[in-house]
Image: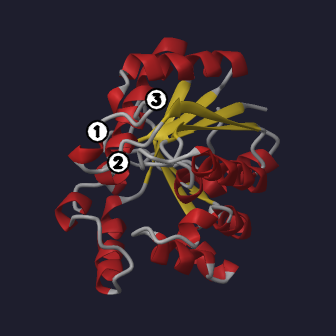
Amino acid sequence: MATVVALHAHPDDEVLLTGGTLARLADEGHRVVIVVACDGVVRADATGPALRSRLDELRASACVLGAARVEHLGYADTGHGPELSADPPGRTRFGNVSVGEAAGKLADLLRAEHADLLLSYDPRGGYGHRDHVRVHHVGARAAELTGVRVLEATLPREPVVRVFHVLRVLRLVRRYDPEVIATSYSPRSAITHRLDVRRYAARKRAALAAHRSQTHGTGRAAPLFRALAALPSPIFGLLLGREWFVDPAGNPTRTTSDNLPG
């Protein structure tokens, strides 16, 4: 049995990109550890309860997925705009910390856990969010420091472009630039691992629903999150029942694998 550490940027990212994979790994007897870099809060004036709520939701989600441990690297969200670059009182934004410092924290955890596999993000950070891009660099550096094998969570770019066009027409997403989406995630030819996790659709949906501040909030992605959490499990599984990874050391032209721990 292996120990798999999944590094994510924010609470709820663990569900959207790897929720089915983590549930499957836990059911197969592997030790699953979820690490988030950020606390999920952008506001500089957030108080204790607001800071705790997103991490409490993460712990509830991790429990649904079967994770054995949840850790926060200790950073605040960086946000999207330049006006959010300054650190809030008593908190350091992830984008303002050096890659070396954050990677050192992650490397310590990987060693303490005797990790066999690290799940991180592709070089684009998916759709280009600065915290997601930073996760890629921190994960890659921590893997270098420890020698732990790394796989990068991603999506196949070609269907993502089509799906986002539909979501924009339905006004379920507004924030993302079509030109950014056109170069997001990874082309199908680069993907080395494609996992069928439809068996875990109900658990993945329940883990998403645990992030109540996102599914019942007023954020820009809230309509999409609410729509996903309300779907029947079979339909949720059709839409989100496969998850994809790139092995940065692998041959992208080979047939994709449906297995992660080596």
SS of the residue under disc 1? loop
- Left or right of 40: which side holds 156? left
* Observer-nearest of 103 and 119: 103
Q: The N terminus lies in which quarter of the figure?
A: top right
Residue sitting at x 36%, y 51%: 126
Crowding near the residue tagged with mark 3, few <14, some 14–19, many ≥20 C-alpha atoms within 10 Å: many
Q: Examine the image and state in which quarter residue 88 appears.
A: top left
Estimate the spatial distance between the alpha carbons at disc 3 and disc 2, rounded to whole Å: 20 Å
Its colouring scheme is secondary structure
- The dot on residue 79 is 2
Q: Which residue is mark 1?
A: 85
The x, y position of residue 252, in whole percent, is: 38, 42
Q: Earlier in the sequence, mark 3 or mark 2?
A: 2
SS of the residue under disc 3? helix
Q: Which residue is mark 3?
A: 139
Task: Using the rendered image of the protein, determine whether residue 252 is visible from the camera's viewpoint.
Answer: no
* Observer-nearest of 99 and 125: 99
Q: Is the residue 40 above or below the residue 205 in the image?
A: above
Residue sitting at x 54%, y 14%: 146
Q: Examine the image and state in which quarter residue 197 appears.
A: bottom right
Task: Using the rendered image of the protein, determine whether residue 42 is visible from the camera's viewpoint.
Answer: yes
Whether the residues at callouts 1 and 2 have beta carbons within 8 Å, the answer is: yes
Residue sitting at x 49%, y 38%: 120
Kindly identify the amino acid type of the residue bearing the numbered disc 3.
Gly
**Name of the residue lying farthest toward the bottom:** 170
Q: Nearer the viewer, mark 1 or mark 3?
A: 1
Estimate the spatial distance between the alpha carbons at disc 1 and disc 2, rounded to whole Å: 8 Å
The x, y position of residue 28, in whole percent, is: 80, 46
Residue sitting at x 49%, y 53%: 244
Q: Is the residue 205 above or below the residue 132 in the image?
A: below
